[in-house]
Each structure stands twice: as C-alpha cells, then as structure tokens.
Image (cartoon, helix red, strand yellow):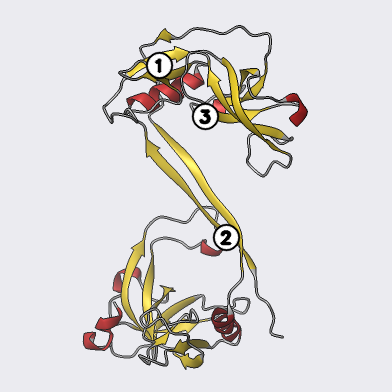
Amino acid sequence: MPELLSAPLVVEFPFTRSLGPVQSAFLTGLRERTVLGVRTSDGKVLVPPVEYDPATAEEIRELVEVGATGTVTTWAWNPSPRRDQPLTTPFAWVLVKLDGADTSLLHVLDAPGPDDIRSGMRVRIRWAEERTGAITDIACFEPADSEPATHVTGHSGVFDEAVTAIVTPARLDYTYSPGRAQSGYINALAGRRTVGERCPNCRKVYVPPRGACPTCGVATTEQVEVGPRGTVTTYCIVNIKAAHTANLDIEVPYVYAHIALDGADLALHGRIGGIPYDQVRMGLRVEPVWTSSSRHPDHYRPTGEPDADYDQYKELL
C-alpha cells in the first residue's frame, strides 16, 4: 500500500472592515458598558442593531439603550471549548433577549453545568475588564435570577473617540489528505521531478493533477513528467510582507508568477528569484531551485535562454 499522505493546513487572514454610524455606535457603546439597539418604523428594537430594516429594507438610525440584563430564549451546552472561544471552561452558547429588545443576541453563558440552564432564565452581562470596542467587551453572561427588568431609553449614539473600524481574524484549521493523483505529484516532487496527468480525451497535461480533466470531466491516470524548465506567463510584484508565516519569510518586493512548465498545458505558480524584481517579464525562461530540506522548489530562476515567443504560451495565460 502506498503511504497515505496528510498534513495540517491553516488558512488565516485578518479581515478589516469599516463601520457605519450604527455599528460604530454599538461597538463604542460596548466599550462604555452601554448596549445600543436600533428602533424600526414599526417600533421593534433590534439588538445587535442593523442599518437597514430586515422587513422593509428602509434605512434606520434611531438608536436606543437597552438593559444589561435579559432572558435566555434558547441555549446549547459546549462541554469542550476550543482555542480562542470566549471561555476556557465548559459553557453554554445562548441567545439572550436583552430587556427592551425584540431580538436575541448570541453570546456565551458562564454556568456550572447544563442542569443549571433553562430557557427563560434571567441573566446579566459580565463586562470584560479591558474593553476596546468589540463584541468581546461582553466577556460573557452570568445567571441573575434576582435582577429586575430594565426599560429601554433613547440614546444619541455619540461617544468620545468612536470606534470606526474593526479587525476580525479569520482562521480555518484542517487536515488535508491528497488523493491518488496529487499523492503521485507530491511523491515525485520528493525526487525533484514534476509530474502531471494527461487527459485521454483532449490529450492535455495538467500540473498539478487532480485526477480528472477539468475540461472534459473524464478521469486521468497517465502520468507525464514535465519541465523542469518553464516559461513565465504572467506575474505580480508582492509589496506586502506575509505576517506570521514562517515559510513565506521573504523580503519584499518579490515576484510571484504563473509558470508553464515545458510539456504542461496548465501553468502553476512559484516565486521568481535570482533576478531583480523589475526585470521579470512575460516569456522569461526559468528553472527550479531546490533546497536540501524542501519537497518542492524554493523558487525559480532565469535559465539564460532567449525569452519564449508569446504565441508559445498565450493559451496558458
């Protein structure tokens, strides 16, 4: 049996968004221990607030302050918190209708166990000690059966030093297991060879192979060794350094290119080195440069050959 390949992969990036007047007031209010909602034309109070009425699509701007106490409408117990979740001990995900609101806010409830939670129970906000203007300024909810209901009041939404943008980290952790075609491709790279697969119908060679022709939709099994040299078909100049990524700790600017390896009918991507970034061009002939510890080329460098004619690679742009 061939070795079953797998590897942990992480897709991660910071997502930055600007806030409109309603979301700005809501998050700034949390920093000031104030929960704001927005009132629709039919008198409903929405928490969290939105800028447009979900029923009529009209713009809504009337802000109101609701209570820091509320009622659990439904819940689900989480016995095993994961990394970066609000609490490190078991907790409940809850929908809480805050006093004065007509909709429910999703957050977490700190409770000893599932037997201590019920729909209809009264809860209150536990504020974070350090608040920055984010939903995490609400550290969690906690039981508060003795807390009386509070009433909604109008609010201007005006605060000093309003929060105008937020950065939300997005991260996906998963384990990737390549199939037969990609396992063959990866194993060949370990021997400093690049292999694709040829479609039995259109005869095109695809690198990296996927096990099926993306044009004809038929299975591919015939392996074809391509390269090692190839042609730059198009490229971009990278001016922003990758953050927190050890295998991309490369000084900027650098060039990332699509490279059509000789014998392949699909361009793959790779970094171009050994040449100033402003001298990289379409048609440049390149070859792979391997490092002793890498299973794939570290980068591609110029071969010194004359540039390829445009007609030779125009279909691979």
Q: CA distance from mark 2 to mark 1?
A: 40 Å
Q: Is 88 on the left-hand or right-hand side of 53?
A: right
Instruction: Give the numbered dot on residue 244.
Output: none
55 vs 221, nearest the viewer? 55
67 vs 307, nearest the viewer? 67
Amino acid on which disc 2 is placed: Ala
Q: CA distance from mark 1 to mark 3?
A: 18 Å
Local secondary structure at mark 3? helix
Query: Image height check: is 74 above or below 181?
Result: above
Where is the N terminus found, in terms of image quarters?
Answer: bottom right
Query: Image height check: is 131 above or below 213?
Result: above
Report the number of numbered marks: 3
Amino acid on which disc 3 is placed: Ile
Amino acid on which disc 1 is placed: Asp
Res 272 seen here: no
Q: Is 57 on the left-hand or right-hand side of 140?
A: left
Q: Which residue is mark 2?
A: 246
Which residue is found at the position 50% from the left and 21% from the top?
31
Q: Percent x, y for residue 221?
A: 51, 90
Q: Which residue is mark 3?
A: 135
- The 10 Å Cα crowd at callout 2, few under 14, some 14 to 19, many 20 or more, is few
Q: Which residue is mark 1?
A: 160
The image quadrant of residue 68 is top right
Q: Earlier in the sequence, mark 2 or mark 3?
A: 3
Which residue is found at the position 45% from the left and 90% from the top?
226
